[in-house]
């Protein structure tokens, strides 16, 4: 059972969070400050520390260094956005905005603990850990999932094994293939990259395996294929799931017999090619449906590597953003630009369905549109805010909400969400408080208060005049 330490000075929030985690089978300990946590507990005994940013005495970010290898998840409010960004730079594994719903918190906890466990399993010993931390092939990132990938590349590359790379669109599967080739014994020979989805089905066999003169209409000359061009080196087939069944049969012969026969030829040619394939599709499922040759699937599924989606790479997002911002600022002869706090929040909370490719496009667009010397703002990124993980409207101070609204000051109702707290607090106090006072008590801006009123359907109380 994973162990979690909660560091939160508000008893109401701490108790509610403890109950939530215990219901999800976690072993939980509590502290009200950094000092109490350091005096009562040994941090290495825990799998995760969940800490409020603002604590009496010392801030929650002090736990990052004190915790060593134990990941620290920081809880913060919208008003503390810049501090939240700073905490990520200090080494916090992630941050979560208050108030959060139960599912959001549990998802974050599972993600962080899962990453830490995978990193521990793959680190092995000190030398292996050092090897895993070394980035390859121009890839950027030091998150646990990327260190795991680097370690696997280091192990696989020197062998002759066929590699199947899984990953969503835009994650950088071709970079992984290039890294494998660079670290292999074939690095002095060509790496031939082919996007199977980009070549018409009627031409793919000719492109890959070549053809004889007159083999088909339009074949005016004899031509060697890309498989032959990769002789002695590496053939990278991106989106191999899009390869037609006829081409799959020819590829299988290349792998099994080490020979290629051009279309229209009666003779085969020996080739020495290492295959690295990539796909975002489930090839096993395609094979079961008869859309991919089962024998080819088993032949290429020797070593599997998975490129993690950007949303699972934590602090790598900011590292990539800084590198890309500097790169495009230099490319377009601009003064190096910084991101506004709002842009940083948008980048770190967006789900990035297009992954690194989408991030690169967003940064390039923002640099082009930004006035020289200005900050890169979130509107220039043109991010679809419907895909942001944490809604800015929900950002507030749950400590104030819970303290005012809990029916029992020490035992909050388990079924009462923080959004319910907000609604009850506004309804119960709007007759006696101004909008400014309500916003201050809830820890939000007047604009945020107004927006949440609109979303929850709580009309503003009209003032009466005599």
Image (tube, rainbow, N blue to C red):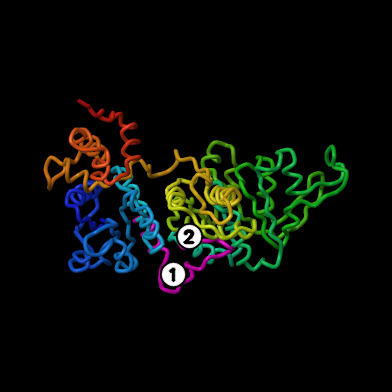
Considering depth in this image, is 27 or 434 the residue closer to the camera?
434
Closer to the chain start, of discs 1 and 2, is: 1
Q: Give coordinates of residue 357: x percent, y percent.
A: 57, 50
Q: Residue furthest front?
A: 466
197 left or right of 449 in image: right
Q: Which mark is residue 137?
A: none
Q: Give coordinates of residue 314: x percent, y percent.
A: 43, 56
431 left or right of 381 in image: left
Q: Residue at x 34, y 31 (%)?
A: 454
Q: Residue at x 55, y 41 (%)?
A: 287
Asked if residue 271 can be seen in this view, the reply is yes
Asked if residue 166 can be seen in this view, the reply is no
Q: Residue at x 40, y 44 (%)?
A: 389
Quadrant that contains the C terminus? top left
Q: Quadrant of residue 446?
A: top left
Q: Give coordinates of residue 388: x percent, y percent.
A: 43, 43
Kindly identify which residue carries mark 1: 129
Relative to 93, say whether 452 is above or below.
Answer: above
Does residue 139 belong to the magenta stretch? yes
Q: Quadrant of residue 120?
A: bottom left
**Mark 2, residues whose alpha carbon is within 10 Å: few (<14), some, or many (≥20)?**
many
Quadrant that contains the N terminus? bottom left
Residue range in magenta is: 113-142
Which-is-in-front pick, marks 1 and 2? Answer: 2
* Prevailing secondary structure class for the magenta stretch in the rendered image: helix
Relative to 197, say whether 315 is above or below.
Answer: below
Does residue 357 belong to the magenta stretch? no
Kindly identify which residue carries mark 2: 146
């Amino acid at each position: 059972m994973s162990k979690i330490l909660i560091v939160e000075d508000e008893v109401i929030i701490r108790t509610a969070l403890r109950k939530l985690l215990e219901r999800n089978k976690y072993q939980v300990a509590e502290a009200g400050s950094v000092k109490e946590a350091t005096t009562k507990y040994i941090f290495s005994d825990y799998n995760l520390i969940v800490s409020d940013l603002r604590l009496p005495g010392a801030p929650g970010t002090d736990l990052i260094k004190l915790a060593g290898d134990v990941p620290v998840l920081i809880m913060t409010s919208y008003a503390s956005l810049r501090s939240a960004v700073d905490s990520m730079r200090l080494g916090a594994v992630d941050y979560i905005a208050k108030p959060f719903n139960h599912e959001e918190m549990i998802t974050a906890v599972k993600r962080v603990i899962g990453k830490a466990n995978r990193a521990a399993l793959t680190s092995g010993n000190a030398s292996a850990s050092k090897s895993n931390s070394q980035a390859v092939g121009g890839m950027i990132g030091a998150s646990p999932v990327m260190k795991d990938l680097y370690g696997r590349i280091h192990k696989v590359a020197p062998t002759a094994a066929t590699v199947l790379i899984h990953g969503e669109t835009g994650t950088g599967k071709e970079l992984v293939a290039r890294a494998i080739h660079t670290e292999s014994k074939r690095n002095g020979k060509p790496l031939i990259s082919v996007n199977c989805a980009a070549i018409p089905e009627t031409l793919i066999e000719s492109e890959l395996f070549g053809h004889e003169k007159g083999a088909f209409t339009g074949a005016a000359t004899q031509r060697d294929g890309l498989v032959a061009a990769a002789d002695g080196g590496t053939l990278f087939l991106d989106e191999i799931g899009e390869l037609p069944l006829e081409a799959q049969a020819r590829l299988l012969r290349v792998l099994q017999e080490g020979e290629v026969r051009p279309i229209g030829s009666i003779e085969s040619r020996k080739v020495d090619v290492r295959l690295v394939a990539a796909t975002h599709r489930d090839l096993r499922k395609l094979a079961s449906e008869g859309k991919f040759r089962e024998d080819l699937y088993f032949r290429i599924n020797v070593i599997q590597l998975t490129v993690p989606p950007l949303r699972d790479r934590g602090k790598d997002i900011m590292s990539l953003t800084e590198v890309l911002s500097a790169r495009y600022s230099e490319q377009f002869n601009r003064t190096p630009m910084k991101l506004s706090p709002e842009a940083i929040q948008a980048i770190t909370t967006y789900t990035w369905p297009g992954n690194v490719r989408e991030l690169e496009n967003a940064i390039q667009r923002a640099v082009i549109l930004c006035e020289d010397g200005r900050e890169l703002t979130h509107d220039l990124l043109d991010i679809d805010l419907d895909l942001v993980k944490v809604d800015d409207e929900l950002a507030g101070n749950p400590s104030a909400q819970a303290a005012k609204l809990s029916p029992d000051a020490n035992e909050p109702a388990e079924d009462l969400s923080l959004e319910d707290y907000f609604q009850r607090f506004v309804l119960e106090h709007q007759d006696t408080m101004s909008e400014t006072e309500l916003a201050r008590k809830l820890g939000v801006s007047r604009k945020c208060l107004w927006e949440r009123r609109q979303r929850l359907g709580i009309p503003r109380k009209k003032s009466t005049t005599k």
